[in-house]
Amino acid sequence: MTTYTRREFIKRAALQSAVVAAGVSFPGIVFPAQQSANISGVEWKKAPCRFCGVGCGLLVGLSGGRAVAVKGDPASPVNRGLACVKGYHVVQALYGRDRLTQALVRKNGKLVPVPIGEALELVAAKMKETIAKNGKDAVAIYGSGQWTIPDGYVALKLFKGAIGTNNVEANARLCMASAVTGFISGFGLDEPMGCYEDIDHANTFVLWGNNMAEMHPVLFSRILARRRDDPNVKIIDLATRTTRTSRMADHSILFAPQTDLAIANGVANLLIRGGKLDRDFIAKHCSFKQGKFDIGYGLEERFKFKEKVTDSSFAAYKALVAEYSPASVARLSGVSPQDLSYLASLYGDPNRKVMSLWCMGANQHTRGTWINNLIYNLHLLTGKISSPGNSPFSLTGQPSACGTVREVGTLTHKLPKGVVTNKAHRELAAKIWNVPVERIPAKPTHHTVDMFRALDRGDIRFVWIQVTNPMVTMPKLNRYRAGAKKDGRFVVVSEIYPTPTTDVADVVLPSAMWIEREGMFGNSERRTQHWEKMVEPPGEAMSDTWQLIEVARRLGYEKLFPWPRETHIRDIWNEYTRFHDNPKHRMAPYELLRERPGVRWPFVNGKETRWRYNAKYDPAAKGTSFDFYGKPDGRAWIWLRRYEPPPEMPDGEYPYWLNTGRVIEHWHTGSMTRRIPILHRAVPAAYVEINAEDARKLAIVNGENVRLVSRRGKIELPVAIDQRGSPPPGQVFVPFFDEAKLINELTLDAYCPISKQPDYKKCAVRVEKISRA
Amino acid sequence: MPVFSYLAHPKPGQGRPLADRLREVPGCEVVPSEGYELIVLVTETEDDSEEKLLHDRLNSLDDLESLAMVYGHDGRELPEDQL
């Protein structure tokens, strides 16, 4: 066995990264010395990247029991050998100095190490005690779109099938829930109808509120490469602030927050007035529906909302969108009539194949379901859907928000197939899980914001948090952090590093990370990707799946979780995929996932379904053209939705919009990326972007500290003027990766009443000058 | 112990001279492509001041068109309060 010093393996990693980058960026250029299959002593194995929802395929270089290098997997159709700055450094996230290796239990106010067996016993005992004293609905689990598929499946089975509570939620409620309700309300089934191959066919890319250059960089690289190869390609960036994406787009259109609703209706209005509809498509494949208006914002403690759907008509729809004339849209949004006409001309041009792409700007929105519907409306009105290049594409943030949270169903109302309110769906779950159907409750309990409100109130007394950091990410954070720390609450946190969430834990379980355990993720384009265990986890760290199984067995559910450790991932996959055994969702067999760089579902007769609902490509679609089989009428639903303002807007006391988000270098709350030295040094701390003219009026210079104040909290941050992002006047932007600067102490816990997803993009703050940095 | 890797683009036709010049710079490992269209450069220095000297030297090379960093490890231990 070859051994390397640390210095040698860093140099090897540096060299190989550069050779691969050269090979991908400059096809045809060859480095003869590096063309041998492997550097001596380094073995390469495939895995999807740990970070975002693009799901890049990577090859991890292993030597001496450690992950020493990463390269993009040339065999992956997703990224074709490319990776982004986070992906190229991902293996370093395994080796932070303060990696959790032992279980910790809080004794006399301090977390002390204990053997993991003791910690698991305590977790099971506390669950039993809480259930006995307060009932089944007093225990809850809060997981993540970074859960592997087996993690989520076991959690769901334990809580819904074994214990019998619907208190299962995941942080994808905070990122993708509006995308889900957009899909379900429009098409009856979740997840995109298209795939990444649409990029190779489209010649028009409209980005709705998504800084794709930083958030989905490898996919954006594919779009840029498409434009390089075809001068007819246009990239339009619709955003509330100027970003790196804006600067690379052909046309950047800035709009006032929340007014994307008006813009979408305004485009629809122009399509109708200009005769640019595909009337045949609409007549054969669409229905018009209306829901409630004035639906609230979820701010009340026990807020409830129930949608009411009524049949509508093209005439009613035409009358509604007619209110969104170019002049009225301009007054509301700041988007000029010329720009609105330009957008309509792109969508309405029969020679243009249009891909709309969106993510958090549309989803983290108090009318997130509505804006998702309205973007789909544009594609349905023009018939530009479910065919190569014509693709409304909802991008996913996390690596397995699709694969785990949405497909496994780790949300209060969901099951792996269907919903808890549907008797047939409960019966299927009961049959596969071998439990009495009465044990699976028919009523959802708490969505995420409501779950943490319930913890604060004491309706929930025990919560197990895995692979997520809610004590950084919950909006209106002060309330929910205080709630978690109240007497009579028991918080278990499964983590890889200390975080503000482990700070409030009663028990911390050390988790195995990514390639330290076998697993699967599911990315934005319905691609399930498998990886094998490649390195040992440190100390007593254990996969989240196995932690759950260990506790389940201690609770007396051995028969429901019988799988041997050696084969449990395969066994779980085989059980889970029984839920999806039909042509609309069939998943690939385990053995195929091991071989290939991912397989897209539905996987039918040995083939991936690339475009759903189109009989030419989708074996589940009946007839010869389109079949939106998710809806009882076989049609896609065009929704009548309107502009409604957010609950909190700038005013005299708080005159600025606050927008929050990410930067390319950091993943979410930074618990991994801030421990990768080069990424940490690139962006070491949070800051507040402010418009240059606003800064001048406030007599603030770049780098100066200011105080941001909202009705909920305040924070001091250094100012960034015209750095990577530039908000327009009256707006500020703060990234949320810095646990020393908890911007969510200022945000508002208003949410879309349909999806229950909070809006992190809009609340009101004021900016106070403090002193020079 | 900073370690970085770069793609070094030579000015047109200057690939071989550039590779020769780079080999003369202390702390550089030079891996040219077969046709010298592009050079992979791996640099290794002891500390920031040495890194700066290296960069000054690289910036003085007339045959060098551009340098694109691919991988970086600056070798610093993070202070406890930044973990």
Image (tube, rainbow, N blue to C red):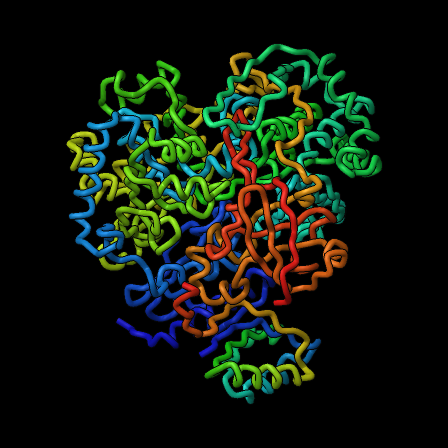
Relative to residue A641, is residue A59 depicted above or below?
below
Q: Is residue A200 visible to us here?
A: no
Closer to us: A497 or A458: A458
Left or right: A564 as drawn, with respect to B42: left
Relative to residue A84, is residue A368 depicted above or below?
above
Q: Please provide percent x and percent y for residue A409.
A: 39, 30
Left or right: A375 as drawn, with respect to A682: right
Closer to us: A272 or A764: A764
**Quarter holding the N terminus of chain A?**
bottom left
Q: Please provide percent x and percent y for residue A453.
A: 42, 33
Relative to residue B80, is residue A693 depicted above or below?
above
Displayed quadrant of residue A197: top right
Q: Please provide percent x and percent y for residue A417.
A: 38, 24
Relative to residue A293, is residue A734 depicted above or below?
below
Closer to us: A111 or A510: A111
Q: Please provide percent x and percent y for residue B73.
A: 47, 71
Number of numbered markers: 0
Residue visible at 52% across and 24% down in the picture: A184
Residue visible at 69% across and 59% down in the picture: A721
Displayed quadrant of residue B52: bottom right
**Quarter holding the C terminus of chain A?**
bottom right
Closer to us: A611 or A211: A211
Residue visible at 70% across and 59% down in the picture: A722
Q: Is residue A281 visible to us here?
A: yes
